[in-house]
Image (cartoon, rainbow, N blue to C red):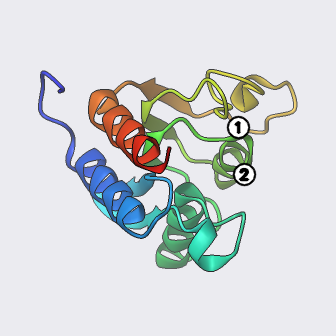
Amino acid sequence: MTRWPLPEPMKRALALAQAAAEAGEVPIGAVVVKDGRVVGEGRNAPRGLHDPTAHAEIAAIRMAATVLGNERLTGCEMFVTLEPCAMCAGAIVHARIARLTYAAPDPKGGAVAHGARVFDHPQALHKPEVVSGIGEAEAAEMLRGFFRERR
């Protein structure tokens, strides 16, 4: 487990990931914060919604944009339990999220530190600050447990 207290938004993202797992979805949760206030949150729901774009990050971005009344989420930070995929990293770029904090790396499907490395692409219109590893042990164990039960 983590040796220091997790930030409240990451705790909430982990709780959302657990809710996703309980619904039979891959356990990923995301929270968007602006000025210390949660303005968006989401959990994975592609299976339940029959929507391949229903990732936790997309749901959190949509909610935050609605709450703030703006598609540009400047000054916002996203906390997510797994390194975002290319679709979600692209949405983070387009939303102009200032900082991304993710828990566990995703060597197979991630696109921040792995794979496409979307933020490093020369055509990326925006590059958020990235922090990784906050809540990694908790998120990784939740993912391992979820897939272990399905094998």
The residue most toward the right is: 123
Q: Amino acid at mark 2?
A: His
Q: Nearer the viewer, residue 53 or 149?
A: 149
Q: Nearer the viewer, residue 18 or 82?
A: 18
How far apart are the alpha carbons under marks 2 and 1?
7 Å
Q: Position of residue 42 (x, y in %)?
A: 45, 65
Q: Taking 126 as reference, is 72 above or below it?
A: below
Is residue 113 left or right of 4 when viewed as pictured? right
Q: Position of residue 3 (x, y in %)?
A: 13, 21
Mark before the other along the chain sequence, 2 or 1: 2
Label at residue 94: 2
Tell me if label 2 and label 1 are in contact, CB under 8 Å: yes
Q: Amino acid at mark 1?
A: His
User: Tag 2, which secondary structure?
Assistant: helix
For residue 50, what is the image quadrant?
Answer: bottom right
| Residue at 42% from the left image edge and 70% from the top image edge | 23
Q: Is residue 12 visible?
A: yes
Label at residue 126: 1
Label at residue 1: none
Is disc 1 surrounded by few (<14), some (14 to 19) or many (20+) residues within 10 Å?
A: some
